[in-house]
């Protein structure tokens, strides 16, 4: 972006104020766009329907987690990409990026504001959907619930809360990837192709790369638990098993390294936002 004039520099708002303005714009955009409202309602209905039809809501919190994990591995990336894949592209098509280049706002502030604004809407959808599932479990479960995961075979709402937070974390990571795709593409036709490609890579490609690496001996037995963090999807799955499913069972083989998986998701999130910033500057 071009350098601001001296007059602009004198009145340049703080970084926090710049980000807040973009966040407010994105929030208002999401609120008045019917597509996002329909998308959120549809997502909540599908998740609630899957939880009920699988019988998890009558079995308890952890059975519901087990039943929802695989569908959410597909649904959450699709939802996050839908929220973010046109975030920067839309600004470019409307000429707003060119206008922004004449104002004292940094590309990193713009990208972060867009990300946070879209993240608010995305998190509302994820949290409300899973909250509805938790409420359904309260009314439909057939066994008493234990509140503390302190011994084997305990089914606890705390474990479901962990699952909800991990799902939100996963959604935020995919949103960052979608915004990076949006910034790189800049054009509507290109961004659709790149968004679909990114979904395929995240949902299939990276996991296949891990399988190939393990089968060919590139990834050894001792490093597999850490290598899983290379794929956002595998990192999310491993965290859910380690922090929720195995915790409830009280025993079982280790499925992932929690620190490595958390670090992997953070790297994907921050790295994607850096890519989006660099692409926005061009």
Image: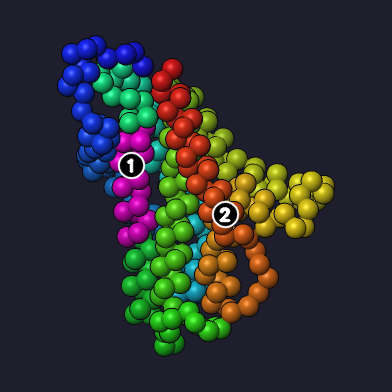
Look at the numbered disc 2 and give the secondary structure of its residue: helix
Quadrant in which the N terminus appears: top left
- Residue 31 is left or right of residue 255, and the answer is left
Magenta region, mostly helix, strand or loop?
helix
Q: Residues within 10 Å of mark 1 (few under 14, many from 20)?
A: many
Q: Position of residue 17 (x, y in %)?
A: 22, 34
- Residue 183 is left or right of residue 229, and the answer is left
Q: Which residues are magenta?
A: 111-128
The one nearer the camera, 9 or 165, is: 9
Residue at the location (67% across, 57% down)? 225
Residue at the location (53% across, 43% down)? 267
Q: Spatial distance from mark 1 to mark 2, Cα to Cα?
A: 22 Å
Look at the numbered disc 1 and give the secondary structure of its residue: helix
Dot label at residue 261: 2
- Is residue 110 visible in the rendered image? The answer is yes
Between discs 1 and 2, the one toward the N terminus: 1
- Residue 238 is left or right of residue 104, and the answer is right
- Residue under label 1, please give it: 116
- Residue 37 is left or right of residue 261, and the answer is left
Residue 116 magenta-highlighted: yes
């Amino acid at each position: 972006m071009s350098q601001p004039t001296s007059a602009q520099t004198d009145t340049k708002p703080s970084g926090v104020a710049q980000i807040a303005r973009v966040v407010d714009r994105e929030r208002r955009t999401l609120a008045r766009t019917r597509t996002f409202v329909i998308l959120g309602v549809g997502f909540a209905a599908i998740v609630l329907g899957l939880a009920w039809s699988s019988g998890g809501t009558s079995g308890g919190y952890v059975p519901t987690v087990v039943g929802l994990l695989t569908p959410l591995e597909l649904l959450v990336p699709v939802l996050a990409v839908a929220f973010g894949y046109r975030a920067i592209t839309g600004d470019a098509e409307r000429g707003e990026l060119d206008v922004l280049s004449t104002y004292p706002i940094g590309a990193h502030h713009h990208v972060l504001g867009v990300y946070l604004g879209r993240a608010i809407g995305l998190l509302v959808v994820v949290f409300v959907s899973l909250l509805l599932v938790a409420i359904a479990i309260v009314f439909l479960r057939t066994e008493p619930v234990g509140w503390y995961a302190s011994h084997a075979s305990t089914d606890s709402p705390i474990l479901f809360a962990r699952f909800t937070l991990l799902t939100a974390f996963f959604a935020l990571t995919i949103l960052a990837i979608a915004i990076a795709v949006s910034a790189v593409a800049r054009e509507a036709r290109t961004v659709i192709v790149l968004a679909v490609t990114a979904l395929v890579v995240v949902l299939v490609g990276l996991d296949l790369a891990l399988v190939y690496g393990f089968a060919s001996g590139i990834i050894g037995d001792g490093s597999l638990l850490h290598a899983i963090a290379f794929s956002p999807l595998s990192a999310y799955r491993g965290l859910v098993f380690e922090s929720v499913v195995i915790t409830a069972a009280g025993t079982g083989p280790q499925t992932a390294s929690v620190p490595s998986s958390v670090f992997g998701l953070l790297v994907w999130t921050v790295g994607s936002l850096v890519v989006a910033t660099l692409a926005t500057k061009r």
